[in-house]
Image (cartoon, rainbow, N blue to C red):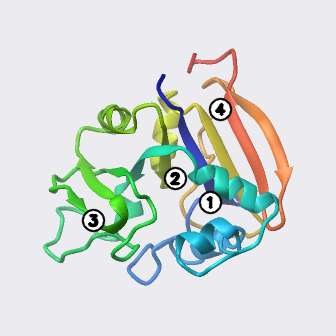
Amino acid sequence: MAGKVRVSSYAVSVDGFGAGPDQSLSNPLGVGGESLHEWFFPTDTFQKLYGKGHGQSGVDEGFARRGMDGIGAWILGRNMFAHSRGPWPDDGWKGWWGEEPPYRCPVFVLTHYPRASFEMKGGTVFHFETGGIEAALKRARAAAGDRDIRIGGGAETIRQYLRAGLIDEMHIAVSPVLLGRGEPFWEGLDLPALGYGMLESSAGERATHLRIGRTSTGAAQ
């Protein structure tokens, strides 16, 4: 049995942005974008992932932990992997995460420009898919087996998968921050028409957690 295609622990500002504006090497999440993840940083899951010992328990930690459980492959948009645009520069860039990324499974990066796969410490293997979202999902399914596939972002990548009806369930962490500008997440998405509805709303310590999933009606069905 195939696993779910899901979005987990994706942070959105109160005014609907999934990242700040003007992504760069010094601002990988855009200007102000790091504030979206203030709910995640103190959790036990984050602290263990990045080798800083134990963190906090609670509602936020429960969502963070479940977001990492049972994943057999990830799909990322190019902007989640690199700040560069256009053909891949010959600069040895291997992502934002250092020598041992937190994924520890195959990761498929959507791009218009071919690049050879490579493996990192801890079992993360980055592959680069030029055939679009469905081609990436097909490869991810083959790699994940019966485990889940996590669509990691950014905002437009998730929106593409939602518009195609390919996401089974989505967890959005609404952070209590206003960005003003950035990458809009909800804009133009008619989720009920696409076959999605609310499953749960939970107040965490530093964010409000929304679970959205398939319903019995809509175009996605």
Residue at the spot of label 2: 155
Q: Nearer the viewer, residue 90 or 41?
A: 41
Q: Residues within 10 Å of mark 3 (few under 14, many from 20)?
A: few
Tag 4 or tag 3, which sits nearer the N-term? Answer: 3
Q: Would you say 113 lies left or right of 204 here?
A: left
Q: Residue at x 72, y 68 (%)?
A: 39
Name the residue located 16 percent from the left edge and 52 percent from the top edge: 114
| Rendered residue at 28%/70% (across/down) | 94
Mark closer to the chain start, 1 or 3: 1
Disc 2 to disc 1, C-alpha distance: 8 Å
Q: Name the foreground residue: 172 vs 138.
A: 138
Q: Amino acid at mark 1?
A: Phe
Circle 1: is it few (<14), some (14-19), or many (20+) Cα within 10 Å?
many
Q: Provide the residue designation for mark 4.
A: 191
Q: Secondary structure at mark 2?
A: helix
Depicted 88 relative to depicted 154: above or below: below
Q: CA distance from mark 4 to mark 1?
A: 17 Å
